[in-house]
Amino acid sequence: MALTIQERIKDLRVKRGLKLKDLEAATGLSSSALGSYETEDTKDITHTAIIKLAQFYGVTTDYLLALTETKNHPNAELADLRLSDDMIEVLKAGRVDTALLGELVAHKDFMKLLADIDIYVNRVAAMQIHNLNAWVETVRAKMIETYQPGETDIETYLSDAVLLRERDYFTSRVHEDIDTIMEDIREAHRGRSESGPESSVIAELKQDLEDVANFKGSRAEAWLMMYCKQTQTSYNRLTEEEKQWLMKIAQKSKLAKGHVSQRGKKK
């Protein structure tokens, strides 16, 4: 999935090893504003900030605004890309995650992966493997002729093991290549909005319950904090009026009523 505006702004800074103060000195934008631009809660980023950041990082404003995945080549000609008609149709139809595809192709080991596939598909090594296997067969025939070993003889077993099966060999090579690339991309995606949570739902719920248990306030306020955590709402950013309004709604819930003391009620 494509990065959000906030993730793009942060990603460009982190990749250059810059701190907010460094970026402030380079762009003239305040570090507090720059920090706010990198949080998902931020909705307002000024046009001036977008232009200054795009100029500083050497990317297009469309890239920062998540309108394109192209950072530096907004008007690249299709002919220059040397794509087949089928490839263009696939990309235009949106049937693949082009951002992920781009990460795959740009990975440092992609050429190694492509080379291994090319060697197998175009039978580049087929003759050499055939010659190696023919040599092994010749040696085995000579051994049988000389020693007349039985089917369970260790030399015969080992000569079978030496035979190289082209498909098995290159399947293993390609598997190793793609595994390395996937792990690197997976690590690069850690913490992104579309990535899965690092901790389990049970662990998060346990932490929420501990936070509520340690909360200094009334039971009603603790219940409201739990509600905010489950709905990913910032409790501290609620106004007093909003808190009172939510509590009135909560009082109509059967779950909230379950927390009301039963003392003094007739059985």
Image (spheres, rainbow, N blue to C red):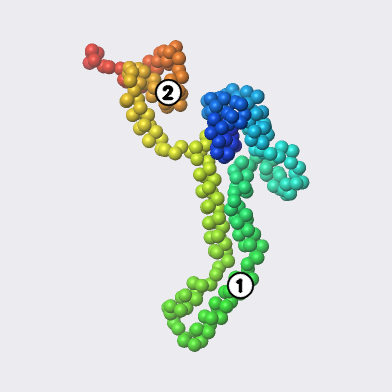
Is 138 or 258 nearer to us in this picture? 138
Placement of the C terminus among the 4 image quadrants: top left
Q: Of helix, strand and loop, which one carries label 1? A: helix
Q: Residue at x 43, y 79 (%)?
A: 153
**In this rendering, does residue 63 appear at all?**
no
* Alpha-carbon span between mark 2 and mark 1: 67 Å
The label number, if any, that marks residue 170 in the structure image: none
**Displayed quadrant of residue 70:** top right
Is 227 or 55 nearer to us in this picture? 55
The label number, if any, that marks residue 130 in the structure image: 1
Residues at marks 2 and 1 touching, judged by CB atoms closer than 8 Å: no
Q: Of helix, strand and loop, which one carries label 2? A: helix
The percent position of residue 7, horizontal first and vertical second, equals 56, 33
The percent position of residue 188, horizontal first and vertical second, equals 53, 43
Type of the residue with mark 1: His
Placement of the N terminus among the 4 image quadrants: top right
Q: Looking at the image, is 4 positioned above or below residue 215?
A: below
Left or right: where does residue 163 sit relative to residue 27?
A: left
The label number, if any, that marks residue 228 in the structure image: 2
Q: Residue at x 55, y 77 (%)?
A: 136
The percent position of residue 229, horizontal first and vertical second, equals 42, 26
Left or right: where does residue 166 sit relative to residue 122?
A: left
Q: Looking at the image, is 55 positioned above or below residue 123?
A: above
Q: Residue at x 64, y 33 (%)?
A: 56
